[in-house]
């Protein structure tokens, strides 16, 4: 390891980075900006490190604005890897006097939602084909009916899930008319921040701002990339007391939803990255990274309200996706409660110690909070308990992290045999064969070291482990 590490450090030094590694944490800083705070990456020695991701992380730590404000701390989780927009996935940045729209990006409030169901796994697998056909219709062929009253949609964007529930109880439409809205209300305490941020419906795209019945094609959709709906089995319970309190039992069926704000987040994210660039003081040198922070208090407040609007949309998107699964299980197995365990965001900016904390591909891990960390569709996912580790900015990984890009997985010459891809025995339902290849287990880092390194660092503790049974990829 040491000769290889020394070669890596010398190569990064030639690229303008000062990097140190103590066997557990990489510390990185731009040589050109020695006054910037050092960025730290928790990364065990048996996982790969990419120079491009370290460059992006150091550039994020060096951000400043001519009008003031500063980056105070930058951390990255063990699943970190380069981001297409110039910010590494797994980055967590603590700022004072400025916010960074690019540090969240366009998939605002991408996150995880986990339910469990008291259905025997053998009974579920016996009706696998009927379940798959129904879910293919919902996820791929538009058989879902997600009609919303304009008042419910406006209340959602302004007030989050509580506002949506109040208005939907008044006028349930489409699949909402078949939901147990009382159960959804009771489960709202199991959504991070109650699924309620202070938004502004004016930030919705034009197509959502209409009177009467609104049929938004983006709601209850998975999206691309690493998003999914997955059915799982609770394979092992480690912390029995905590699992019992959260309603999790060994042998249960479980289902997990990973999705975000879809076109709503793209609209807000792209608009504000452009606005941050346009607001940059005339004549001031542009950040070399191309990432522009906001420092004007009025613009900061407006951006955060716009981001909150998209985040509220994402909370409902995940809720509706989970309801499609829950309703399908009820059609096949009768009166199934399938309670929510937790719903948590990955990409979001929130208040933190007098400033702001922006996570991009990182999961909040506050004290005693459920933390959901998915593996690949061929590896276990984990339900963890956060420990509120301040050094880690109360943040954990949001997955295993990609080891190979989608392009490298699908390009000509890549190995496409099932066993090489780790797809042997994997039940992946997708419309396009290349999605299975792009998202194959071989594209991801091993989840075990990612979890173990965070347990060793007192960031999280294991509660339960879940084994995938089938995965839906859009």
Image (spheres, rainbow, N blue to C red):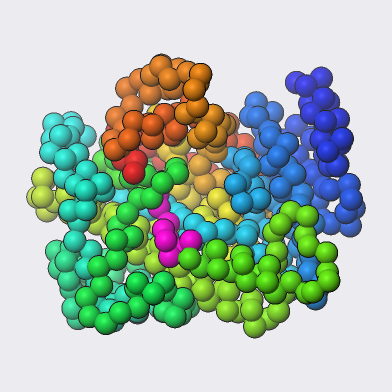
Q: In the figure, 465 relative to 349: above or below?
A: above
23 horizontally vs 350: left or right: right
Q: How many marks?
A: 0
Q: Is residue 340 visible?
A: no
Residue 182 position, x and y percent, is: 22, 70
Does the magenta-highlighted stretch encompass residue 24? no
Residue drawn at 41 percent across, 58 percent down: 262
Q: Which residues are magenta?
A: 258-266
Where is residue 444? Give x, y as percent. 51, 32
Q: Residue at x 29, y 38 (%)?
A: 431
Q: Is residue 38 left or right of residue 359?
A: right
Give the residue drawn at x 15%, y 34%. Answer: 129
Foreground residue among 249 and 151: 151
**Which quadrant would residue 295 be assigned to in this image?**
bottom right
Above or below residue 383? Residue 436 is above
Q: Give the side of residue 277 with respect to residue 154, left or right.
A: right
Residue in the image at 16% along x and 66% along y: 174
The answer to whether residue 464 is seen in the rendering is yes
Q: Residue 146, how many percent across, how many down? A: 23, 64
Locate residue 381 relative to residue 317 in the image: left or right: right
Which quarter of the figure is the C terminus placed in?
top left
Q: Residue 276, relative to residue 246: is it above or below?
A: below
Which quadrant does the N terminus fall into? top right
Using the rendered view, name the quadrant where residue 124 is placed. top left
Can you say whether 52 is above or below 6 in the image? below
| Depth order, front residue of 354/167 | 167
Q: Nearer the viewer, residue 376 or 119?
A: 376
Residue 240: percent from left, percent from top:
39, 43
């Amino acid at each position: 390891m040491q000769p290889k590490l020394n070669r890596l450090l010398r190569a990064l030094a030639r690229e303008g980075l000062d990097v140190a590694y103590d066997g557990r944490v990489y510390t990185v800083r731009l040589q050109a900006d020695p006054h910037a705070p050092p960025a730290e990456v928790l990364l065990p020695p048996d996982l790969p490190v990419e120079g491009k991701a370290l460059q992006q992380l150091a550039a994020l730590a060096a951000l400043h604005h001519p009008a003031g404000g500063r980056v105070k701390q930058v951390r990255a989780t063990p699943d970190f890897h380069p981001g297409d927009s110039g910010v590494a996935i797994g980055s967590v940045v603590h700022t004072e006097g400025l916010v960074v729209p690019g540090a969240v990006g366009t998939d605002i409030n991408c996150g995880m939602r986990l339910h469990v169901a008291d259905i025997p796994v053998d009974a579920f697998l016996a009706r696998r084909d009927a379940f798959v056909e129904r879910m293919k219709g919902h996820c791929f062929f538009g058989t879902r009916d997600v009609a919303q009253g304009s008042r419910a949609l406006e209340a959602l964007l302004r007030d989050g899930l509580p506002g949506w529930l109040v208005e939907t109880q008044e006028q349930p439409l489409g699949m909402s008319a078949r939901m147990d809205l009382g159960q959804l209300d009771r489960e709202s305490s199991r959504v991070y921040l109650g699924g309620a941020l202070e938004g502004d419906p004016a930030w919705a795209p034009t197509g959502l701002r209409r009177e009467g019945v609104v049929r938004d094609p983006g709601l209850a959709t998975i999206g691309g990339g690493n998003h999914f709906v997955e059915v799982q089995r609770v394979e092992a319970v480690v912390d029995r007391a905590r699992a019992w309190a959260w309603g999790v039992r060994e042998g249960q069926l479980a289902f997990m939803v990973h999705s975000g704000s879809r076109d709503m987040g793209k609209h807000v994210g792209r608009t504000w990255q452009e606005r941050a660039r346009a607001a940059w003081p005339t004549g001031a040198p542009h950040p070399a990274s191309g990432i522009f922070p906001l420092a004007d208090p009025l613009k900061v407040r407006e951006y955060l309200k716009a981001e909150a609007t998209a985040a509220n949309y994402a909370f409902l998107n995940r809720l509706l996706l989970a309801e499609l699964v829950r309703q399908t299980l009820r059609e096949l197995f009768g009166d199934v409660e399938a309670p929510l365990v937790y719903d948590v965001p990955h990409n979001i900016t929130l208040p933190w110690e007098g400033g702001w904390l922006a996570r991009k591909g990182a999961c909040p891990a506050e004290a005693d909070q459920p933390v959901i960390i998915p593996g690949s569709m061929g590896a276990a996912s984990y339900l963890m308990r956060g420990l509120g580790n301040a050094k880690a900015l109360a943040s954990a990984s949001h997955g295993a992290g990609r080891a190979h890009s989608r392009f490298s997985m699908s390009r000509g010459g890549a190995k496409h045999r099932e066993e090489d891809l780790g797809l042997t025995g994997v039940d992946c339902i997708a419309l396009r064969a290349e999605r299975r290849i792009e998202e194959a287990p071989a594209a991801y880092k091993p989840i075990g070291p990612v979890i173990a390194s965070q347990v060793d660092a007192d960031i999280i503790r294991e509660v339960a482990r879940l084994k995938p049974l089938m995965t839906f990829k859009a």
